[in-house]
Amino acid sequence: MATRNELTQAISDRYRNAARPEKKRILSEFVAVTGYHRKHAIRLLRGGRFELVDRRSRSGRGRYNEAVRQALVILWEASDRVCGKRLKSLVPVLVEALERHGHLKLDGEIRTRVLEASAATIDRLLKGARAGVRKRVARRSGAALIRRQVPVRTFGDWNDPSPGYMEGDLVAHCGDQASGSFVYTLSLTDICSGWTECVPLVVRQAVLVTEALEQLQATMPFPLRGFDSDNGSEFLNETMIAYCQERNIEFTRSRPYRKNDQAWIEQKNGAVVRRLVGYGRLEGLAAAEALARLYASSRLFVNFFQPSFKLATKTRVGARVSKTYHAPETPCARLLACAQVSEVIKDRLRSAQHTLDPLRLLGEIRAMQHHIAMLADGQISHVPSNNDLEELFKSLATAWKDGEVRPTHRAKPKARRDWRTRTDPFEAVWPTIRGWLEAEPERTAKELLERMQCEQPGAFTDGQLRTLQRRVSAWRAAAARRLILAPPPTVAFGATITVAVDHLPSLSTNLSPPS
C-alpha cells in the first residue's frame, strides 16, 4: 500500500494536466502496475487522495508476548481457574499477595502488561490453556417439603440489605443414590457481599443445623441478622423457629418448588460446594472431618481471593430478560467498601488478607480434595502433605495440559473390554481353516471364506469376513512369534558345518509356519 500511494502521488499531477490520449496511456500503465479497478484508479488520480500507511508501525501488535501469557496462566491457576472478568479484578490482589510471599517475581514491563490487560485479552490469552479442561458438570438439587410456618421471601424482596442477611441450604453428598446415611453440607451466603460459609453435617437434623449456625457466627465478620431457607424439615421446625426468635434473627423461607427464590445460595452450591467437593458419596465421621478441614481453607480462599459477580439491575420486556452486573469483586472487597461495616471489622479483614498466602490455601485445598476423592471411592488414604509450595507453584504453568486438576472431579478410568459379545461363527470349523493355512500360508481370509462358503452353502455370509480376518491375523502373529523365538542350533567352536546344496529344503517348506 505504501508503494501504491507513492506511485499515486508521483503521477497524479501529470495525469490531471495531460491530454486525453496521454491520460489513457497513463491510466492503463497505472492499472497494470497497481492492480486497481479502472474506475477506482481514475478517482485516485483525479483527486490525488493518498495516505502513506506503514502497517508495521501499528501500536499494540506484539503487546502481549509469551511471558505475559505464562504469567496469566499462573495467576489463573492460582485463582482456581476463574473467568477472565473475575480474574481481571483479582489480578492486582493476587500478584501483590504472591510477590509478598515470595512465590512470584515479575519483570517491571511484564507486570505492567499483566495489570493493564482487559478481561477480553485475558480470555484470549488463556484460550489455549482452557482448551483441554472439561466442561462443568450439571448441578443437582433436591426437592423440599412444604411448610407454612414462616413468612415467604422471594428473589425480588431483598432490596439491597445490609451485611448479615443470608440464604442457607443443605447440599447432599449422596452420590447417585439417596438411600442410606451420608454427609451434608450446610452452606450460607450473604446477600450484600457474597460472603460464603460452609460446615459439614453428619446427619440431617434440626439440632445440628442450629449448632452449626452458632459455630459459624463465631467466625463470620458480621452478625447473623436474617436467615432465609427452603422448605425442608431440617429448617422449618420448632427448634429452628425458637432459635431465631431468641436471637432476634429474621427467619423467612422461599416458595415451594421455586428454586429461583434462593438464587444466591443455589449459585454458591454449584460454584463453591460442588466445585470443591464434587458429586461423590461421602459417609461417616471421617468424611465429615475431611470436609471440615477442606472448608477451613476454602472459606478463606473463596472469600478473599475469588471475585464474583453481583446483579445490578434486571428488566423484563416481554419474554426477554436483560441483566446488568457490577464489576467482579471478592466478598472481602465488598465488605471493605460497605459503609455499614464498622472500621474495627474492616481493620481485621485487611490484617487477615495481608497475612494470607493464596498458594498455600490452594495447596491445602488440593490435598483435602485428594483425600475426599479417595474416601468417595471407598479407599482409606492418608492426607497428603502440602508443604512443597515451590513444586505446586512450578506446576501452575503446565497444569492446564493435564486437564482436570481437582481430584474430586477426575473421571474414573474405564475397564478394558476383553470379552466377546457374540458367538464366534468359525469356532467349529477353525481346525479345518487352520489346516488350509498351514498348507498354503499365502491364502487370504477372503479366499478362505469363499472356499468355506462353497463347502458349506448358507452357513457363512460375506459380513463375517472381518471376523475371519481377525482370526487369520492372530494365527499369523502366533506363527511369526514361534519362528522368531525358536532356539538356534548349538554348534561347538571350531566345528565346520558342510551342507550339500542339493539337500537344502525348499523355501516354501522352510518358511511355512508350524501348526
Image (cartoon, rainbow, N blue to C red):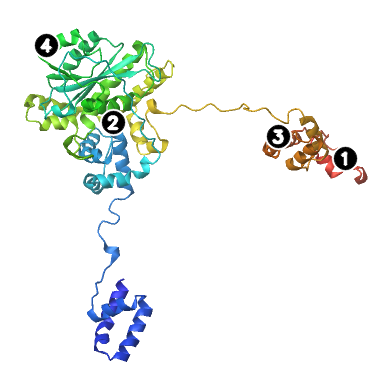
Give the amino acid at mark 1: Ile
Q: Nearer the viewer, mark 4 or mark 2?
A: 4
Q: Relative to residue 70, is residue 230 depicted above or below?
A: above
Residue that numbered label 1 is attached to: 497
Crowd band around label 2 with a 10 angstrom C-alpha radius: few (<14), some (14–19), many (20+): many
Q: Nearer the viewer, mark 2 or mark 3?
A: 3
Q: CA distance from mark 3 to mark 4?
A: 79 Å
Residue that numbered label 3 is attached to: 471
Please provide percent x and percent y for residue 446.
73, 42
Q: Which one is earlier in the sequence, the residue at label 1 or at label 2?
A: 2
Q: Residue at x 31, y 71 (%)?
A: 1
Q: Nearer the viewer, mark 3 or mark 4?
A: 4
Q: Nearer the viewer, mark 1 or mark 2?
A: 2
Q: Nearer the viewer, mark 1 or mark 3?
A: 3
Residue that numbered label 4 is attached to: 245
Please provide percent x and percent y for residue 315.
17, 39
